[in-house]
Amino acid sequence: MTRTELGQYLANLLQLSNFKDYAPNGLQVEGKAEISTIVTGVTACQALIDAAVELNADAILVHHGFFWKSEPEIIVGMKQKRIKALLVNDISLFGYHLPLDAHPELGNNAQLAKVLEIVEPESIENVAQGLMWQGRLATPLSAKSFNEHISAKLNRQCQHLGDSDAVVSTVAWCTGGAQDYIDIAANMGFDAFISGEVSERTYHCAVEQGIQYYAAGHHATELYGIQALGEHLADKFGIKHHFVDIVNPV
């Protein structure tokens, strides 16, 4: 398929026009016109780009791309090296941030529910651009046991804030750096809230509001959406897909 066809298909699939985001969604760096091999990964770091070069990729699709609103506009240092590697090797970079979090089937939140075996998962309407999800556990667990479950499923030690003996049945979540949505989850009466990161204030929010908080890792909670998207494209269009996990403990 062509680069333009891929961009148009993903714009429709992920409904890019519905989101107000912190970075451009879609094509961020232009490479060759024809695409037969794609690499997917969480973040467009140098290691991922190097892996894509080794795999002879025509395009890279990531969740965390370039040109964030808060970053310097000049292309020097680390950013220059990354972009130069893409241009020299004629590799396109596509980035999909909030639209990939929110997609009802391929998105990070939907995919995390599958991994954690949360039943009846669904987006909470009219809350945080549809980025916050809700569901329940098939069998209620103690807060400590649920922490162990999350840690085993994500293959990393999850950090639990709250009462280890509390019972968890209803769960809300939002992948990545959404720890401040804990107040919304507490006000809505959920037993627990899961996200990727944690702040100092998160502890007090959890304890004082009686909600269990699970910091499961920004990278770990967002591994699955971009991988599912790549697999979808490979199945639909017959292109080669390689998912590359650049390990990140954060």
Image (spheres, helix red, strand yellow):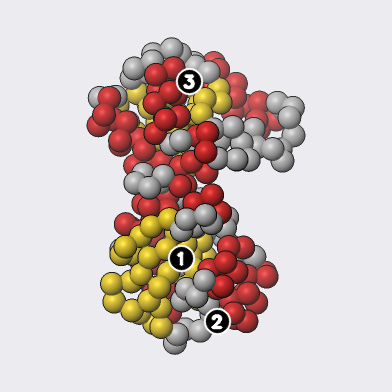
CB under 8 Å between discs 3 and 2: no
Q: Position of residue 180 (x, y in %)?
A: 62, 63
Percent position of residue 34, x then y: 39, 13
Q: Are marks 2 and 1 in contact (CB under 8 Å)?
A: no
For image coordinates 56% across by 73% down, the residue present is 187
Sooner in the amino-acid sequence: mark 3 or mark 2: 3
Q: Tell me the SS state at disc 2.
A: loop
Residue at 52% from the left image edge and 33% from the top image edge:
17
Rate crowding at label 2 as few (under 14), some (14 to 19) or many (20 or more) other CA atoms within 10 Å. Answer: some
Q: Residue furthest front?
A: 126
Q: Which mark is residue 172?
A: 1
Q: Which residue corresponds to mark 2? A: 210
> Is residue 64 at least partly visible in the picture?
no
Amino acid on which disc 2 is placed: Gly
- Give the residue furthest to the bottom: 165
Residue 104 vs 214, above or below: the answer is above
Look at discs 3 and 1 and give the one toward the viewer. Answer: 1
- Residue type indicated by callout 1: Ala
Label at residue 91: 3
Q: Quadrant of residue 75?
A: top right
Image quadrant of residue 155? bottom left
Mark 2 or mark 1, which has the lower sequence index?
1
When asked about the image quadrant of residue 28, the answer is: top right
Instruction: Say above or below: 125 vs 51.
Output: below
